[in-house]
Image (cartoon, grey):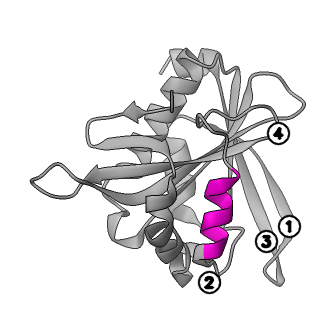
Amino acid sequence: MVLLLTSERLEISPLVGADIADFAAYRRRPEIARYQSWGVDFSTADADALVAAQPAAGIPEPGEWVQLGLRAAAASDGSRLLIGDVAVGVDSVQPDSYELGVTLATEHQGSGYAAEALTTVIDWLMAERGAHRIVMQGDARNTAVLVLMRRLGLRHEGSVVEGDWFKGEWTTLERFALLRREWALR
C-alpha cells in the first residue's frame, strides 16, 4: 500500500512517473532553485532518477528520503494538479527524528498550501510514525520559509552564520525544530 495523506485542499503522496515533467519544470525556475540544493539545470532525467530511487511505499527508512507530491484540485472533473512537494528524510543516527523541506511552484505560493501540507505531514509523522523530533532549515535570505516555520510552531534553534558554502557564496542557515510534546500543545 502506498502512502496517501489528505487535507482540506490537497492529496499528498509519493511522486510517480506521471509527475516527472511538472516536477522538473517548477524545479528549473530560477526563483524556485535559488535556495534549493539543485540548480536551474534540473532535468527530467534528474526527476526520473529521483522518483525511481524512492522507497516503494513512500515511507522512508533511516537514512532515506521521499518526495511527497502535493496535488490540488485542478478541474471540475476532480483531476489533481502537482503544485509542489514535501521532502521527508529520516535521520540515520537518531531514532524517530525527521527532516522536512517544502517546495511550491511559484504560482501556488502564498495560498497557504505549504502550511497545509506541512501540518498534514507533521500530524502523520507524529501520530503514525512516532516522531520524537522534526527539523527544518532554510537559507536566512528566504524569509518566506522562515516565517512559515515559525507560523507552524517550530522553535528556532540557531543560526549557522556563513557556515554553508552554497552556489558560490557563503550563506547562513537558520535551523528550526519541533518536539512531539510541543506539537501536542499547539
User: Left or right of 136: which side holds 91?
Assistant: right
Residue 176 placement (x, y as % from top left) = 68, 42
The segment highlighted magenta reads 45-53
- Given residues 92 and 47, the one toward you in this image is 47
- Answer whether labels 4 and 2 touch (C-beta < 8 Å): no
* Residue on which disc 3 sits: 171
* Residue on which disc 1 sits: 164
For the residues labelled 1 and 2, the Cα–Cα distance comes to: 20 Å
Q: Earlier in the sequence, mark 4 or mark 2?
A: 2
Residue at (38% x, 63% y) in the render: 109
- Given residues 56 and 160, the one toward you in this image is 56
User: Left or right of 165: which side holds 25?
Assistant: left
* Three-letter residue code for mark 4: Gly
Crowding at dot 2, Cα within 10 Å, few <14 / some 14-19 / many 20+, comes out as: some
* Residue on which disc 2 sits: 40
- Tag 4, which secondary structure? loop
For the residues labelled 4 and 1, the Cα–Cα distance comes to: 21 Å
Q: Is residue 52 visible?
A: yes
Q: Earlier in the sequence, mark 3 or mark 2?
A: 2
Residue at (66% x, 47% y) in the render: 54
* Three-letter residue code for mark 2: Val
* Three-letter residue code for mark 3: Thr
Q: Earlier in the sequence, mark 1 or mark 2?
A: 2
- Answer whether labels 1 and 3 touch (C-beta < 8 Å): yes
Q: Nearer the viewer, mark 4 or mark 1?
A: 4
* Three-letter residue code for mark 1: Asp
Q: In the image, which disc is placed on residue 97?
A: none
- Answer whether labels 3 and 4 touch (C-beta < 8 Å): no
Q: Quadrant of residue 139?
A: bottom right
On whether residue 120 falls in the magenta region, the answer is no
For the residues labelled 3 and 4, the Cα–Cα distance comes to: 25 Å
